[in-house]
Image: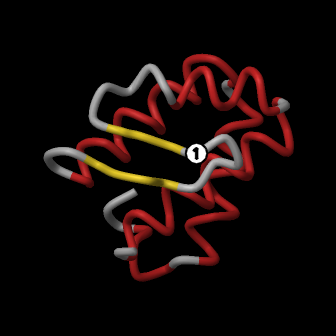
Amino acid sequence: MTDTENFITDCIKAHIAVLGPVAALAIARKIPSLKIADNGDVLAITGDAQATLEELKNAYLSFAGEASQAIMRTLEAAHPELAHNA
């Protein structure tokens, strides 16, 4: 898995912990370029992984607002190599 795929997996799993699996997975599965397992693992990304990450972030921010922003800040701190792209 690439760093971006790992970051997306971490993002989905963090949102599962906060929003619950039904909501978090439903939001992620609306991203056409993203295929994920029931546990939140990235199975495949078609196209640009960075664009997929941005689309996922925007979807979670739209749904969960402040909670999602807090999750993303925590993930960016844990993955500083991707923080400027996330």
- Colouring convention used in this rendered image of the protein: secondary structure
Figure check: 38 above or below 84: above
Between 68 and 47, the residue placed more toward the observer is 47
Q: Residue at x 74, y 51 (%)?
A: 14
Disc 1 target residue:
37
Number of callouts in the render?
1
- Which residue ends up furthest to the bottom in the rendered image? 81
Tell me the quarter of the picture where residue 85 sits. Answer: bottom left
Q: Which residue is drawn at 27% across and 35% down?
A: 33
Tell me the quarter of the picture where residue 69 sits. Answer: top right
Figure check: 19 above or below 17: above
Figure check: 43 above or below 61: below
Q: What residue type is labelled 1?
A: Ala
Figure check: 65 above or below 75: above
Tell me the quarter of the picture where residue 15 sits. Answer: top right
Expressed as whole percent of the image width and height from the top left, the position of residue 45 reads 29, 49
Expressed as whole percent of the image width and height from the top left, the position of residue 38 reads 67, 41
For the C terminus, the quadrant is bottom left
Q: Residue at x 85, y 31 (%)?
A: 20
For the N terminus, the quadrant is bottom left
Q: Is mark 1 on a helix, strand or loop?
A: loop
Q: Is residue 60 left or right of residue 43?
A: right
Q: Is residue 31 left or right of residue 19?
A: left
Q: In this view, does 65 lie to the left or right of 6?
A: right
Alpha-carbon neighbours of circle 1 within 10 Å: few (<14), some, or many (≥20)? few
Expressed as whole percent of the image width and height from the top left, the position of residue 60 reads 58, 29
